[in-house]
Image: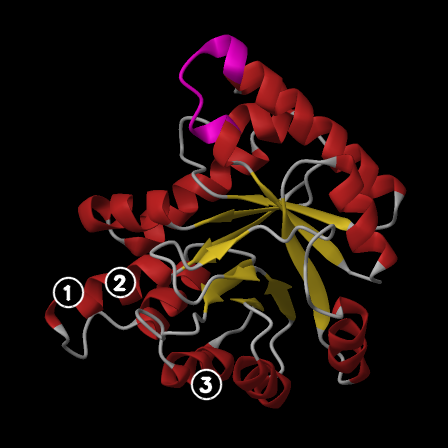
């Protein structure tokens, strides 16, 4: 049965709109855990536009489940993550001057020694994942770097405009997930996952964890955080014949 991890970045983004103390991602995290999430995720960007250092420390203190920090391989963030020691870090490509500050890791062109970063985190008991495209070569490269997990970018599938395009992207995710499993990696999926499009991904049967943020946070505005999380968690646990 796959796990659910709730990303609370949107809560921080909403707070930023008015530059006020609320809503607090930590409060949302507590409610998400009460709603049945298996883990929490948050992204600390180089520019700290939404999530603040303070949020990371508080989330580490209040979280009762698995806390994953998505982060670029920037020296100051690495040092902070080594201090906080979340359950896992997921490394993303860093684009400091871009309006889209993060993207998937491309091991063919990355100017970073990931093996050294992985070793530093594993030495203090922190698992390491990589945010990658659903590409078997990238999955194998993550395994070669001694990763614990990969977070597969599902944006191609979740943004597909036709059934044919969606099926093609789904096939790529399936193949990548199989490659991850064969190489001893946990396989996580994220980006654009909603209540409506998650079921085909679950039915692949080879995804260990789903990272969902925007869809849950948006629904929480209407029905509350606990219920929004519970409804998503139920979609992961329904028997196949009842989906």
| Residue at (33% x, 56% y) in the render | 99
Q: Where is residue 50 in the image (x, y as percent from the top left)?
A: 31, 69
Mark 2–mark 1 CB contact (< 8 Å): yes
Residue 10 in which image quadrant: bottom left
Residue 133 vertical position relative to residue 195 in the rendered view, above or below: below
Mark 2–mark 3 CB contact (< 8 Å): no
| Residue at (18% x, 79% y) in the render | 21
**Numbered disc in front, either 1 or 3:** 1
Q: Position of residue 136 (x, y in %)?
A: 77, 36
Disc 3: CA contacts within 10 A as few (<14), some (14-19) or many (>=20): some
- Which stretch is magenta? 157-165
Asked whether 6 or 100 is in front, the reply is 100
Asked whether 159 or 12 is in front, the reply is 159
**Numbered disc in front, either 2 or 3:** 2
Report whether residue 239 is seen. Answer: no
Report which residue position mark 2 lands on: 13
Label 1 vs 3, first from the N-terminus: 1
Label 2, secondary structure: give it: helix
Label 2 vs 3, first from the N-terminus: 2
Q: Where is residue 90 in the image (x, y as percent from the top left)?
A: 61, 63
Asked whether 157 or 238 is in front, the reply is 157
Label 3, secondary structure: give it: helix
Report whether residue 164 is seen. Answer: yes
3D distance between C-alphas at marks 1 and 3: 22 Å
Report which residue position mark 3 lands on: 57
3D distance between C-alphas at marks 2 and 3: 18 Å
Label 1, secondary structure: give it: helix
Residue 217 vertical position relative to residue 189 in the rendered view, above or below: below
Question: Which label belongs to residue 17?
Answer: 1
């Amino acid at each position: 049965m796959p796990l659910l991890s709730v990303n609370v970045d949107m809560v921080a983004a909403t707070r930023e709109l008015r530059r006020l103390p609320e809503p607090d991602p930590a409060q949302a995290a507590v409610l998400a855990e009460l709603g049945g999430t298996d883990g929490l995720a948050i992204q600390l960007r180089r520019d700290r536009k939404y999530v603040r250092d303070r949020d990371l420390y508080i989330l580490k203190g209040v979280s009762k489940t698995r806390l994953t920090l998505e982060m670029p391989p920037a020296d100051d963030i690495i040092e902070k993550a080594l201090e906080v020691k979340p359950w896992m870090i997921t490394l993303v490509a860093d684009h400091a001057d871009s309006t889209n500050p993060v993207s998937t890791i491309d091991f063919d062109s990355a100017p970073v020694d990931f093996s050294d970063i992985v070793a530093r985190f594993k030495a203090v008991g922190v698992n390491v994942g990589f945010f990658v495209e659903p590409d078997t070569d990238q999955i194998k490269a993550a395994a070669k770097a001694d990763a614990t997990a990969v977070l597969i970018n599902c944006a191609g599938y979740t943004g597909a405009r036709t059934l044919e395009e969606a099926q093609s992207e789904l096939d790529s995710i399936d193949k990548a997930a199989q490659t991850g499993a064969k190489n001893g990696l946990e396989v996580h999926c994220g980006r654009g996952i909603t209540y409506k499009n998650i079921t085909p991904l679950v039915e692949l049967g080879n995804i260990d964890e789903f990272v969902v943020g925007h869809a849950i946070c948006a629904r929480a505005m209407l029905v509350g955080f606990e219920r929004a999380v519970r409804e998503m968690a139920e979609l992961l646990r329904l028997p196949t014949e009842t989906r």
